[in-house]
Image: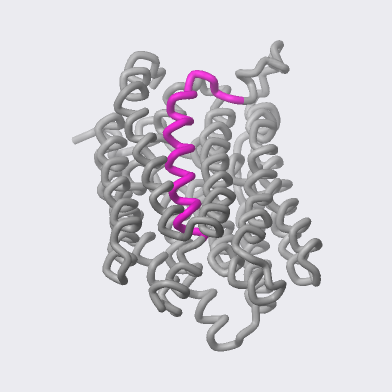
Amino acid sequence: MNPADNEKLWNANYLKVWTANFLLFLSFMLLAPLLPLYLNETFAADKQTIGLVLSGYTITALIIRPFSGYIVDSFQRKQVLLLCYGLFSVFFVGYLVAGTLMLFTIVRTLHGAPFGATTVASSTVAIDSLPSSRRAEGIGYYGLSNNLAAAIGPTIALLLLKYTGSYQLIFVVSTLLAFCGLFINSRLRLPDRPIVKDKQVLSFDRFLLTKAWGASIVIICMGFSYGVVSTYVAIYGKEELDITGGTGVFFMLLASGLMLSRLVGGRSLRKGRITNTAPGGLLISLVGYLLFAAMHSPIGYYGAAIVIGLGNGHAYPAMQNIFIGLAPNNKRGTANSTLLISWDIGMGLGVLLGGAFSEHFGYHAAFWLAWILNMAGVATFLGYVRHHFEKNRLY
């Protein structure tokens, strides 16, 4: 019997931060798939404008994350988490009062900052709550909170919109969910941790984990592909495939693939097979994006969702373990922030360039671009990252 089996994975703190993270992403996923439609219907925004408006959220999250990683490593993590989560919750009120495109853009852009900081703090607290022998497995299961939110969030939002026709109601529900998550995090019982003053406060490596630059390129490519597809899937389905109510099904299939692969991949990560799990997932995702770009039919549309979910569900937690494995304990927050910064860069570029390509060359060109970037990520991992990690890993 493996001694790790005796160590409790689902302890009280891990359950609380897992649930609060689920509510954070659920409040986020209620809005994310519908915002392109909301901007188009409410403010008559075109595709390129939608891309610019929505990319602001990612840009501010990107800007704040290097500093939030440092702050999480330098102060008591519960206090940092509560402050960031509280600000994230309050910003939802802004959507209710934003009556112009300019005001909406300002609120949406500023909202990215507390989101970026909260996700860094939350994932770091989750990792701290795990026994070291089950950390790799726990990181994979932690991602299920995101995936479950991604599965049911768009479906709930589309049902609310279908039966009430009210975007305002969806904004209210998101606000309430976020405050519920804040309350759960307030019940965390974390021991005070000694804070070691870093004499090199301004060193670049205190804000970004420079040893993980190769892994960052892989995550950027993954985020780019996902950003293109996830942002424009609703409008693409409606305008070119005549799929008016299928966006919720798409995200449910995507998230189902993510959850299934994380449950299966968790066993592989538990056995330390990080560099085997990651490339397998990356290659599966590559097939999924190829299917989405090449097959313009409901079968390709829904089939790609499952395959992309299966691939990303294997690859992302393995990549997160690579970031954590390259960082000492006192830079765990920095490792998490570097991972999320890389994803933000990819997502932001995907949203921005995906909108521009869709506007000038059509959706298919944007989806082929997503596939090409995904292929570049696979090549980077196989050509460099796998060997670099095995040579430099600390855990």
Q: Is residue 244 magenta?
A: no
Against 9, is 163 above or below? Answer: below
Q: Going 64% across and 40% down the picture, which residue do you hit?
A: 62
Relative to the observer, which residue lies in front, 179 or 225?
Answer: 225
* Residue 392, horizontal then vertical, whole percent: 39, 15
* Residue 91, horizontal then vertical, whole percent: 74, 59
Q: Which residue lies furthest to the top in this view?
A: 199
The range drawn in magenta is: 208-231
> Magenta stretch: dominant SS?
helix
* Residue 50, horizontal then vertical, whole percent: 63, 61
Q: Going 48% across and 69% down the picture, which residue do you hit?
A: 234
Q: Is residue 86 left or right of residue 298?
A: right
Relative to the observer, which residue lies in front, 314 or 381?
Answer: 381
Where, quadrant-wise, is the N terminus in this rendering?
top left
Q: Is residue 120 visible?
A: yes
Q: Going 73% across and 47% down the picture, which residue do you hit?
A: 83
Q: Residue furthest left?
A: 1
Q: Going 69% across and 75% down the picture, which residue do you hit?
A: 42
Q: In this view, does 301 lie to the left or right of 58?
A: left
Tell me the quarter of the picture where residue 320 sits: top left
Q: Is residue 16 visible?
A: no
Q: Does the magenta stretch include residue 209?
A: yes
**Colour logic:** one colour
* Residue 265, horizontal then vertical, whole percent: 28, 44
Against 291, is 76 above or below? Answer: above
Q: Which residue lies furthest to the bottom in this view?
A: 163
Where, quadrant-wise, is the C terminus in this rendering?
top left
